[in-house]
Image (spheres, rainbow, N blue to C red):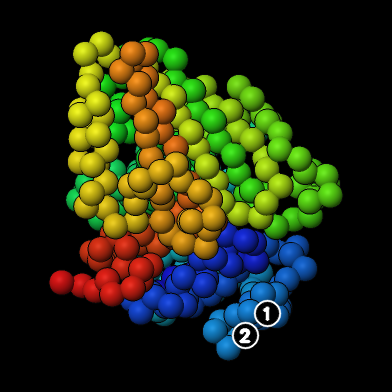
Amino acid sequence: MKVAIIGASGYVGAELINLLTAHNKISIVHLLVSENSSSEGLLFSDLHAKYQGICDLPLQAFSPAWFDENIKNAEEKIDAVFFATPHEYSAEWANIFLDEGVKVLDLSGGFRLKDASDYPAYYGFEHKNLAALEQANYGLVEWLDESFADSKIVAVPGCYPTASLLGLKPMTANNLHIENSLIVVNGISGVSGAGRKASLGTSFNEVSLTAYNILQHRHQPEISQEANSQVIFNPHLAPYKRGLLSTVTLQLKAGVTEEQVNQAYHNAYDDKPLVRIAATWPKIDNVAYTPFADIHWKYDADKQVVVVSTAIDNLLKGAASQAVQCANLIMGLPSEYGLIPNVGVK
């Protein structure tokens, strides 16, 4: 698969490039940044020096003229494009790539919410690309079926929703929770989740553990949509670089047993190589710089409550490595291909 990456200069773009340069079934053809980016004209390895000799492709400015020359009128087109861009950017351009037969893997929030009316409230723009929105498949990899391989446009889940839904869905998909009961999701993320652009709010000299965007975070409707249950989502920013922990509390139906809870999680993840069922409460240090999700839960029979924690690397399982998993499935490969050692094609 020959691909382009738009938004190559940011943290997620850099992680994606790192993964794809080591992937023997995917070839990066173009790296793009915005027209007004100070990175235009630099080599990727100029911007991220540790990739010198690994990826020395130039960073080109994306524009309508670039698209016409390199996509629309190109003799040999790419197969897919990854968007690691602002949300409204991918929402505007996705269908234009689709019209040229190029598949879209969107790491922004441009296609995560199915209801177009949610975008002004949660993302600050009106979604006008309704045809592409209708086509988009949500890429929570461990919960996909074989039909996903036919996807033309993929909405790669957000980092908070990935961790939260991996913990939630074994309960909600099996209808073990009390319908319409209170589900509370507490998430804690490192500052890299805010992106590479310098900001006083994410400076290590300013950041302390704090809650933010309570009852109005854009990931709340995404988690609720994919869990098929309304949740209260409480995000927190913590003073560390990378990693994310989500802890979910939900009420179970009367009569649900610990055995049923345990079986639901094992049925969901025992055959999923990138989700590791942990014997103790997961730690961010155990998943940082890896594509894994570590998950642990505790059941209280007296209160009929289950509490489940999931730890991921927000830039990898919460973004770049999950995007690679989605691309693998589209190519007919195991989702973990190229992400962990000794995974080949049978």
Judged left or right of residue 166, residue 49 is: right
Q: Is the residue 265 above or below the residue 232 in the image?
A: below
Q: Residue at x 26, y 46 (%)?
A: 269
Figure quadrant of the N terminus: bottom left
Q: Residue at x 20, y 29 (%)?
A: 259
Which label was assigned to residue 49? 1
Q: Give how far apart the Cα atoms at labels 2 and 1 are.
A: 6 Å
Q: Residue at x 61, y 54 (%)?
A: 242
- The kind of secondary structure element at disc 1 is helix
Viewer-closest of 70 and 52:
52
Q: Is the residue 145 above or below the residue 3 in the image?
A: above
Give the image location of residue 324, x and y in percent: 40, 62
Which label was assigned to residue 123? none
Kindly identify the amino acid type of the residue bearing the numbered disc 2.
Gln
Q: Residue at x 33, y 13 (%)?
A: 302
Give the image location of residue 336, x and y in percent: 32, 63
Instruction: Give yes or no for contact between labels 2 and 1 (Cβ–Cβ under 8 Å).
Output: yes
Residue identifier under label 2 = 52
Figure quadrant of the C terminus: bottom left
**Across the whole image, how many numbered discs are drawn on residues?**
2
Kindly identify the amino acid type of the residue bearing the numbered disc 1.
Ala
